[in-house]
Structure formats: C-alpha cells, structure tokens
Image: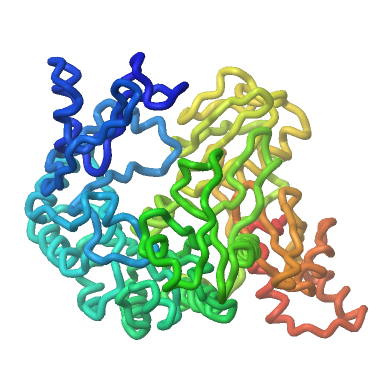
Amino acid sequence: MICECRLFDDGFFNSIMLYDGEISCTELIQALTIGTPLSEVHNIVYRAKQAWKHTEFISNDIINTYVPDFSDYHLDKYFAPATIYPIFTSRSCYNKCAFCTIPNATSGYYRALPLVSVTQNIKILTNKYHAEYITIVDETFDISRMIEFANWLLAENIKIFWYCETRFSPNITYETCMLLYKSGCRQIQFGLESYNQRVLDLMEKHTKIEWIDKALNNCLKAKVPVHLFFFTGFPTETYEEAMNTYQYTRKKVTESQLIYNIISSRGYGTFGLEIGSSVYFHPEKYGVTLIKNNEENDLRLNLNYNVNIGLSQKESEELVKSHNLRDGFPLQNTMEFELPSIDFVPEVHMVIKASTSPHPYSKDVSYVLSSEKILDVIKNCKICIPSWISLVRTNASLLFYNCHLNQVYSLPLIYTKDNIRIGDYEWYAAFFDETEDMLKHLSLLYHFSFIKIENIDKEIVKLNENTILYKSTHIQQYYNDFLNEWILHNTISKNTVAVSKLSFKLLELFNEPLCFGNFTNLLNKNNIKLPHAKLSKLIGYYLKHDIIYALN
C-alpha cells in the first residue's frame, strides 16, 4: 500500500491497522478497491491533510475459521526434518499477567473456536498436505480444552503429533497427561516465569508452586517433554530468587533425560518492561522508575527502567549472559557467514525427536567407530548423499545440513565437483577430489552420517583398553569464570558440554591419539588416582557428545 500520502515523512505507509485483522482487513481491501474513504475502515490510523486520523475502534468477536492455505509455499525447500503446521483454536489470553500486553493487543478479551471445528480443519490439513505435525499457536491452550481436543483426535482417529503452550493448573493430572500423550502430544510449553511464590504473586500469574511441581512430574512420567519459559529481573526479584529458578529448571531438564529418558528444555531472557503492561501503568507498585525512550528509539515497545530494590537491568542481563554460556555457545566465526550467537536446539527438532521411539541409555560405554579403514576402502567404493541431507553452496564452501540431527558440515569448495547429486550411489571420484586432505573430510562426513558408503555399516563397539581416542579438531572451548567450568562445543554436531577443570585437563591428553589403556597407565604413573569406572564414564561422556572420537 505504497502511495504518495506517507505515514512517516520518508516512510512507505498510508495506514496502520491495529489489533485483529479479520474485520478491518476486509474493510480496507474494499476501501482500496472501490474507493470508499479510509475513515470508514475500523481500527486503523491513517494520515490525511498532514494530520493523524484514528478511526472508530470496534472489538472483534470472531476468529478466522478457514483452513490455512500453504499451497504457495515450497515446503520441501525448508531446512527442516518435517513441516509443522500452525493452527489457532483461540485468540488472546484469559489471564492478565503484570508483565504482558497480549490481552491488550488482541482486542482485549479471550475467545475460542469450538474444538470440533478445529479437529475438522486438522483433518483437511492431514489429507491435503499429509501433515504429521501440528502446533497449536494459541497464546495459551487451556488444559480443559487440551483434554477435549485430545478426546476429539482419538474419537476421529486422527494420527498426528502436536504441541502447545499452556498455563500451570491443578488439573494437569497423570491421567490427563497419559491421555494427551496417547492423542499425540509430544511437548507442552509452560510459562513458568519464576519458581518463587512471592514473585509469581507480584506478577499476577495466579499460579501456585505446588501446581508447578505436580504438573511437571506428571508430564514427565507420562513421557510428555516440557519446555519451561522464564525470565530474569522482574521488578524486586533478588539474585537468590533468580538463581532458585535457574537451579529448579536445570534440575527438571536433567531429571527429564536421566530419569524419564525424554528431552525437555528451557528458554529464558531478561525481563522487558513493555509499554501497555500493568508494570508500565503502575510503576510505583513494582518499585521502578521508567526511563523515557529517546527520539531514536521512539518506536520501541520496551522501556528502560531503574529499580529501587532487587536486580537491576544490567545485573539481570549479566546473569542471563552467564547462563547462556552454560546452555549454549557463541558460534560466530565457525563459517564464513554469521550464525546465531546462542545455539538453542529449535523446537521442531525437540518435538520430532519426542515423536520417535526413545533409545534407552546403556550402562556400557559404546560408540561409533571412526575407523581408519574407511580411508583405505573409500577410494574403491560408491558413496551416497542421503535424502535427509541438504546442500548449499557459498562462495567458499559446500554446506552439508543434516535436517534429522540439525548438524552442519562445511567442506571447502576446492575439494568438490559441480555434479554432486543427492540420493544416488556414485564413485567417490565423481563427487570429490582424490586427495589425502579430502579423505580426512570424508571420514568425518561418514562419521556424522552426511554420506553413506555402499555395503558398509557403521561399527558400534564398546570402550576397551585398546581403543584409540583423540580429541576432535572441531571443538570450540571457553572458560566460564562465573560457573568455574569449561564449555566445549562441537561445531559439526552442535553438541555442547560443560566440564570441570580436572575433566578438561584430562581431555588435553587426547590432543594426540592415545589408547584408553595407556591413558589410565599415564594417570597411575603420575600418581593420579581416579576410579576406573569414573574414567570410563568421563570418556563415554566425551564420546557421546563428539568431543573425542575413537579409532580402531
């Protein structure tokens, strides 16, 4: 809608639509088509005769009930292991948390579609697009509606996997979670915000700590992974309260994996004081002083602020930053283009992983053998780039992307040929240059399943005294002073681990290939007495996360 009448002096708009668009968008299209005045379009701001005009505001009591149309999207071009289709079942949120502006941004009140209609829409999606995954994109999918939705899916025999966001409730029982799992629910995202009753009450979350514990335990017992959203620095929150939330969420994520063998996660950031929130309208209640945005930032939706008590903005940012370095890893400079500064696993991978059969953890230390024999045989074998691998050429590299595992390998273009195809077995020389350096790249490409070798299966073996181990050359490492530990990140597999100073020192012994037996003997010679079982566990941990590799 670019025209001569511009909303900003050097901008491109002649109107801005506010709130929901189902009614206003239709009216605007009609106005632009038949030439009726913009003043007759509800819920917009426009400029006329050098003045701002606000049209009449009307509430919207409908939700778009049409089935989403994805026919214009090339869904097969996305770097993702599967397509997850979004579905609305409601609009806005029935709670009004003190930090949130969602109720005010969506016509101010909560309304919901009949779930029988939602179920029929999903039926159409599954038939038209062969959809296997659905995300409920409601601001909050109330637990009572989740139960009804699950029953509809089972009654209609709709076989999909789905996930959603909801609020903590005393009604999230174990039986409910089992029903949700049976219907295909593979992740529930909770707005935890804080694990401190005082802070929750001040936030007006209307949540009890005991509801949180019971709901999470019931989800995990029923094999439903969870994702916990929270933030640091809500006005008056103390350092101790913030750390309590970090410790609790880490505990639940760890329990999820080690006790229930499912992968849960957490996501967090700093508190943002949004214009239009309760904190914005009543700063004195929350002990904050608002700092007005300067002219450069007059369109920002957040304000800076000073606090009278608790964590300041800067202290909150530093606390979040210190934990980001624990949960993720700075990834700049790993390739010739910039990647996100913190590498959290995308939720699509979490949900899809939860929808496949879990692999129980073995007490034995086993690993994929990165065999030197591969280098001997590959010249005389056909190789294949599997269908789940996507290829992207940049100026300097050929990028291999494993959409199943969310892994990337950057191969210098100088080693590649132009006719690389996916899915067909070809002689090695048809794809790549025959050099010793390229063979080393191929060994890693094979190790991480970016290529397959005809008639050769990966060898899974157990750790023994003769196993030769060496540290990966694709490791970024960072010492976190705040947590007094080393962060190690494999830039291919994206595995990230945190280890103690001693564990890191032991890892340095594998900068050159060293067999496990000689490793233990070397420790004994230097009078370093560590139980053999613990050493095996440490090496297994490094192998599992691709920090070290094993040779035959």
Dividing the image into 4 quarters, which one contains the C terminus? bottom right
148 to 294, vertically: above or below: below
Q: Can you give x and y, in whole percent of width and height, for residue 221 in the image?
A: 34, 77
Provide residue 28's location: percent of width, then percent of height. 19, 27
Q: Is residue 366 visible?
A: no
> Which residue is at the front of the view, 108 or 7?
7
Q: Does residue 402 appear to the left or right of 325 in the view shown?
A: left
Q: Is residue 277 left or right of residue 184?
A: right
Q: As displayed, is residue 373 above or below residue 259?
A: above
The answer to whether 10 appears left or right of 3 in the picture is: right
Quarter of the figure that contains the N terminus:
top left
Q: Give the camera-side residue of 117 and 396.
A: 117
Q: Which residue is drawn at the image coordinates 58% and 72% (left, top)? A: 311
- Which residue is drawn at the image coordinates 33% and 68% (left, top)? 224
* Residue at image location 14% in from the left, 55% down from the top: 112
Q: Residue at x 36, y 24 (%)?
A: 13
Q: Quadrant of residue 305?
A: bottom right
Dividing the picture into quadrants, the one containing residue 462 is bottom right
Does the image show residue 183?
A: yes
Percent position of residue 439, x then y: 72, 36
- In the rendered view, would you say 14 is above or below 401? above
In the picture provided, is 429 more to the left or to the right than 437? left
**Residue 180 location (% of width, % of height):** 22, 67
